[in-house]
């Protein structure tokens, strides 16, 4: 049973509410002091990590049953972007695996046949039928690459130093195809030998894992791992933080190995490009006259941390045997995008109050946007207000899910802010 | 007493159906307090009775009034809460509702000139501190951590890292608005006079602080819901934003700028053999500092504080213990140059003279204790407290003893309390499975208001297991009994229900006055009814037995 794995963690929460606030060295105002979109929107403590720990405790102790309140339980579990802000805050004072708790609740819901939610099933079914989350034909996947003369590594005999993995949303979502096109342009400008998987690229499956459908995830992951093996890819570059985290963290967890033991290295495009800048293989020369702020995508930051496998048990006083080095969200990708922005001549970069491992989530992750669009929108609007407070003209990010949700937030709130992808800006500076 | 479907509908009418819930899954998150041994036992014994009948979130004083009127009409009990960190924020009787203040989170006024803030119940120290520091002011912060509600904290007792100057919560309370159990509103201090400002609790207007018995003192029944307070802010000459190094649990701020200076002071004594001398020397230091009226923080940190507060992980905590990083308790002092650099330099000179006089030694910067405490933890006491980490050792802890008295008497109380604990460990094996030696050593001396008075705590660290929690309660009971026998002014806070009746006669029968007020203003006993620690966790009979009656 999923919940038993995290019994100690859930039942030893001291309900101190640290999970509801940003790191206190980082808080700059009363207005932007909170970190958990779920409890800010749901208000009842139940929606915070603390409440979810209580739910697990209740379920395990038999005080609460699914039959008591199945629909509400599903809402509590799934109206959460699993952004891990709670996990990072909690670990400042305790040693509990809060993300493990949130994950286990979703897995438990699926094991019982209650989860995932219909909106999630649609995504998963689409992956099963079309290899992408958008119910689009496979042969359109590489439509953006037409006429760009990019190697297709799925073809026999084709090889390249770098496998550029595009991801479903950049490949299919109208208006977002500029991102892979600009990525290709930048990689070419830096002289990188790269290729794509063309129509054979399939979804990373991260979404299935996020919503607790471990079986579907395993199936999809296996296909991808086989494909990576077949191409002999040693370096995979991707723009989508969801894919990035899935390949580096989730695939490692699935195989019960550390991320660094994976047969390939995954790099987010911002990471790869920042390295190119550092190595002098790429320079930005043309000024871009804009004031921008950067939104850290959770899957790139807090959740983009390499996985460290641990198998062991809790012993006396809750110590772990062998000692467990827990993820704390600090080793995600935070600096690379900032380095890129700072390297663009003429660009003025201003930070929001909640940044890096304390960033406020856009609200769309973990299946929250598809199942609870109102929640996702409210969460995005909060971020937009925070971005507006910086005086920036645009909020820049590097995640298709964040970008489209923030864009919805701008439309709904009547904000004059613009939202954009970092590479759409970077390409202007080439 | 009953909470009926009709009552629920009435609440929905007041706050809107989205702001009230009787869903078992929602209410489950309001039914448990696990960090405290008596909380563990309470949960074990009360079971689902601790789950509220519903949780309601009012958005204004008027809504609170109407909720309490409904409570009176349908005669169901209610428990208001801040963040819900303490054991007394939980129902102890079936059919109780919880009033969650999340919709009341405004800083209504931050008055720089008169140095106070008027706030609603869900304003935490996190936010208030950030805003106050921007204006060169700050709040005292409870070690509980700044994520708790300022209002809940000030309205109970509030003990702070810098109590040396600020005193306790009540002394920082400049006014409040209270909805009495029957729904009527009263205001205290100058807040009661329209247009007078919210700067002073002694008047104009009535000073009703003694009447306020929420929080810890709600054990004999609360007195309604506080909807607004005015709290004092103190001069602050540090940075509005702290320069922090590191990340996440390894994030520290080791500098508060040039207007602040931290010192760690020890005595050349062997520990634990010379614990008594060490504590007495610390007391001498505080008396001298009080005489000279210097300092912003002055406190004696017990080993358990040093280890738990400064740990970055549980493993780190146990490693530090193994490496004897804090071989004894230490005194920690901070000076703040509130008025000028010269003032800071003057206080620094005076402190050096005093430390020399009492035979103390300044801990050097390269000593592990300094590195671990001053670099990692000290500034947290100014910005956000951090005692959530007290639970890190065993994921459960309790105050072993606590007392309010003069500094020298407090030293005596710590020694006696530790002696009882050690004897119980030696002779009866009580607490042998707790985190040791933390559970039987040291004590927090927290002198208040330049040492005018003082409080202390000692701590025990059992695991969250019924057997260990029972032992913790037994140890605390026996320590309390010894205090009782010495006729000390003990505040046996974790057994305050029945213990109140036992200690009342020693304190001018205060318990009878309190109960009289309660009968008058809350005849139905609807506000925080029952005991914080329910009688069926520690019954009056059990308690009396533990105390040898
Ligand atoms: C590890 C740890 C360390 C601690 N250290 C300290 C410390 O150093 N100093 C200190 O002062 N405290 C300390 N505490 C105690 C406590 O957590 C704090 O005092 C804190 O302020 C409680 O705030 P809260 O918001 O969690 O209140 P809650 O727990 O929600 O409420 C506390 C009490 O106040 C009542 N209450 C809340 N709101 C209202 C209202 N609006 N009207 C009427 N009654 C109300 C509740 O019914 C309850 O009885 C510590 C606690 C822990 C667990």
Image: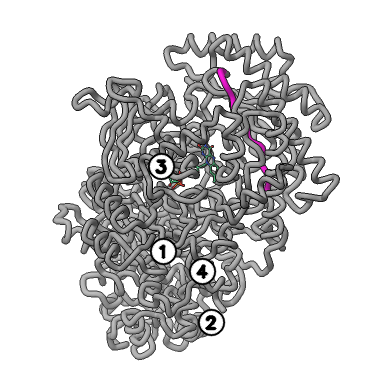
Secondary structure mainly formed by the magenta segment: strand
On residue A58, the disc is 4
Residue under label 2, please give it.
A229
Q: Chain of mark 4?
A: A
- Quick check: is B454 in the magenta stretch? yes
Sequence-earlier tag: 3 or 1:
1
Instruction: Name the residue located 58 percent from the left edge and 37 percent from the top edge.
Output: B376
Instruction: Name the residue located 33 percent from the left edge and 51 percent from the top edge.
Output: B102
Q: Are the residues tagged 3 and 1 within 8 Å (C-beta)?
A: no
Q: Residues within 10 Å of mark 4 (few under 14, many from 20)?
A: many
Asked if residue A220 shows in the view, the reply is no
Separation (CA) of disc 2 from disc 3: 77 Å
Q: Are the residues tagged 2 and 1 within 8 Å (C-beta)?
A: no
On residue A397, the disc is none
Q: Residues within 10 Å of mark 2 (few under 14, many from 20)?
A: few
Residue under label 3, please give it.
B519
Q: Are marks 2 and 3 on the same chain?
A: no
Q: Give coordinates of residue B408: x percent, y percent.
A: 68, 20
* Residue nearest the viewer, comparing B266 with A126: B266
Q: Are the residues tagged 4 and 3 within 8 Å (C-beta)?
A: no
Quadrant housing the C terminus of chain B: top right
Question: Disc 3 on helix, strand or loop?
Answer: helix
Mark in the foreground, 2 or 3: 3
| Residues in magenta, as a range | B452-461
Separation (CA) of disc 4 from disc 3: 36 Å
Separation (CA) of disc 4 from disc 1: 11 Å
């Amino acid at each position: 049973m999923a919940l038993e794995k995290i019994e100690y963690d859930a039942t030893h929460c001291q309900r101190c509410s640290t999970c509801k606030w940003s790191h206190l060295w980082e808080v700059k105002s009363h207005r932007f002091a909170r970190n958990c979109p779920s409890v800010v929107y749901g208000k009842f403590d139940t929606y915070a990590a603390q409440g979810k720990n209580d739910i697990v405790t209740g379920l395990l102790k038999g005080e609460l049953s699914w039959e008591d309140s199945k629909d509400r339980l599903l809402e509590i579990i799934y109206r959460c972007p699993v952004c891990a802000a709670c996990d990072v805050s909690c670990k400042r004072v305790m040693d509990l695996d809060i993300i493990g708790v949130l994950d286990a609740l979703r897995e438990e819901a699926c094991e019982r046949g209650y989860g995932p939610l219909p909106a999630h099933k649609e995504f998963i079914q689409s992956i099963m039928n079309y290899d992408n989350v958008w119910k689009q034909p496979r042969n359109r996947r590489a439509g953006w690459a037409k006429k760009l003369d990019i190697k297709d590594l799925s073809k026999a005999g084709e090889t390249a130093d770098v496998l550029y993995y595009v991801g479903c949303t950049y490949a299919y979502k109208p208006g977002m195809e500029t991102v892979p096109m600009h990525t290709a342009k930048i990689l070419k400008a830096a002289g990188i030998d790269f290729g794509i998987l063309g129509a054979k690229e399939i979804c990373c499956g991260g979404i299935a894992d996020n919503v607790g459908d471990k079986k579907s995830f395993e199936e999809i992951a296996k296909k991808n791992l086989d494909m990576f093996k077949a191409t002999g890819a040693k370096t995979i570059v991707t723009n989508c933080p969801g894919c990035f985290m899935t390949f580096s963290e989730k695939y490692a967890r699935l195989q019960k190995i550390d991320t660094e033991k994976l047969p390939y290295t995954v790099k987010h495009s911002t990471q790869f490009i920042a390295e190119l800048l550092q190595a002098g293989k790429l320079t930005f020369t043309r000024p871009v006259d804009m004031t921008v702020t950067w939104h850290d995508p959770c899957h790139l930051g807090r959740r983009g941390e390499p996985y460290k496998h641990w198998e062991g048990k809790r012993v006396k006083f809750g110590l772990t045997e062998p000692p467990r080095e827990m993820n704390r969200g600090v080793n995600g990708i935070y600096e690379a995008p900032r380095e890129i922005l700072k390297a663009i001549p003429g660009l003025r970069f201003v930070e929001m109050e909640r940044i890096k491992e304390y960033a406020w989530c856009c609200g769309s992750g973990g299946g929250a946007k598809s199942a609870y669009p109102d929640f996702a929108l409210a969460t995005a609007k909060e971020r937009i207000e925070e971005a507006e407070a910086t005086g920036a003209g645009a909020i820049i990010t590097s995640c298709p899910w964040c970008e489209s949700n923030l864009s919805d937030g701008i439309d709904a709130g009547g904000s004059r802010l613009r939202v954009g992808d970092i590479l759409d800006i970077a390409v202007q500076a080439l | 007493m009953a909470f009926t479907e009709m009552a629920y509908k009435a609440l929905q009418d007041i706050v809107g159906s989205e702001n009230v819930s009787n869903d078992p899954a929602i209410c489950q998150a309001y039914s448990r307090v696990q960090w405290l041994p008596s909380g563990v036992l309470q949960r074990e014994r009360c079971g689902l009775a601790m789950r509220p009948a519903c949780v309601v979130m009012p958005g204004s004083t008027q809504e609170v009034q109407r909720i309490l009127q409904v409570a009176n009409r349908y005669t169901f009990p209610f428990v208001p809460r801040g963040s819900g960190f303490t054991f007394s924020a939980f129902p102890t009787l079936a059919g109780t509702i919880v009033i969650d203040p999340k919709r009341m989170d405004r800083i209504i006024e931050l008055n720089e000139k008169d140095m106070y803030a008027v706030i609603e119940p869900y304003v935490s120290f996190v936010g208030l501190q950030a805003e106050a520091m921007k204006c060169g002011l700050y709040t005292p912060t409870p070690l509980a951590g700044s994520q708790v509600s300022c209002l809940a904290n000030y309205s109970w007792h509030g003990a702070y890292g810098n109590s040396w100057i600020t005193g306790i919560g009540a002394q920082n309370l400049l006014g409040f608005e209270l909805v009495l159990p029957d729904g009527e509103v009263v205001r205290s201090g100058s807040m009661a006079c329209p247009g007078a400002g919210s700067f002073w609790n002694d008047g104009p207007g009535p000073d009703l602080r003694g009447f306020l018995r929420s929080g810890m003192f709600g054990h004999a029944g609360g007195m309604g819901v506080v909807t607004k307070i005015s709290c004092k802010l103190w001069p602050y000459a540090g940075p509005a934003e702290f320069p922090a190094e590191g990340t996440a649990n390894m994030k520290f701020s080791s500098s508060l700028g040039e207007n602040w200076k931290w010192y760690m002071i020890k005595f050349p004594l062997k520990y634990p053999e010379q614990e008594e001398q060490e504590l007495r020397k610390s007391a001498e230091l505080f008396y001298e500092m009080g005489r000279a009226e210097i300092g912003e923080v002055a406190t004696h940190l017990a080993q358990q504080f040093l280890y738990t507060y400064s740990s970055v992980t549980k493993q780190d905590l146990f490693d530090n213990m193994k490496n004897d990083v804090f071989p004894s308790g230490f005194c920690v002092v901070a000076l703040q140059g509130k008025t000028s650099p010269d003032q800071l330099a003057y206080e620094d000179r005076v402190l050096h003279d005093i430390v020399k006089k009492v035979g103390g030694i300044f801990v050097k910067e390269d000593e592990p204790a300094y590195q671990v405490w001053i670099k990692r933890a000290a500034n947290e006491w100014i910005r956000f407290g951090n005692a959530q980490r007290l639970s890190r050792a065993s994921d459960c802890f309790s105050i072993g003893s606590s007392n309010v008295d003069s500094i020298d008497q407090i030293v005596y109380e710590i020694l006696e309390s530790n002696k009882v604990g050690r004897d119980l460990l030696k002779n009866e094996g009580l607490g042998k499975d707790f985190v040791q030696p933390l559970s039987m050593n040291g004590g927090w001396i927290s002198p208040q208001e330049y040492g005018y008075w003082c409080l202390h705590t000692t701590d025990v660290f059992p695991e969250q297991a019924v057997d260990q929690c029972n032992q913790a309660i037994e140890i605390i009971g026996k320590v309390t009994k010894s205090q009782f026998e010495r006729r000390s002014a003990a505040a046996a806070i974790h057994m305050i229900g029945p213990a109140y009746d036992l200690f009342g006669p020693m304190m001018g029968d205060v318990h009878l006055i309190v109960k009289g007020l309660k009968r008058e203003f809350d005849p139905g006993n609807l506000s925080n009814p029952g005991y914080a620690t329910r009688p069926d966790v520690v019954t009056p009979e059990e308690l009396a037995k533990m105390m040898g009656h």
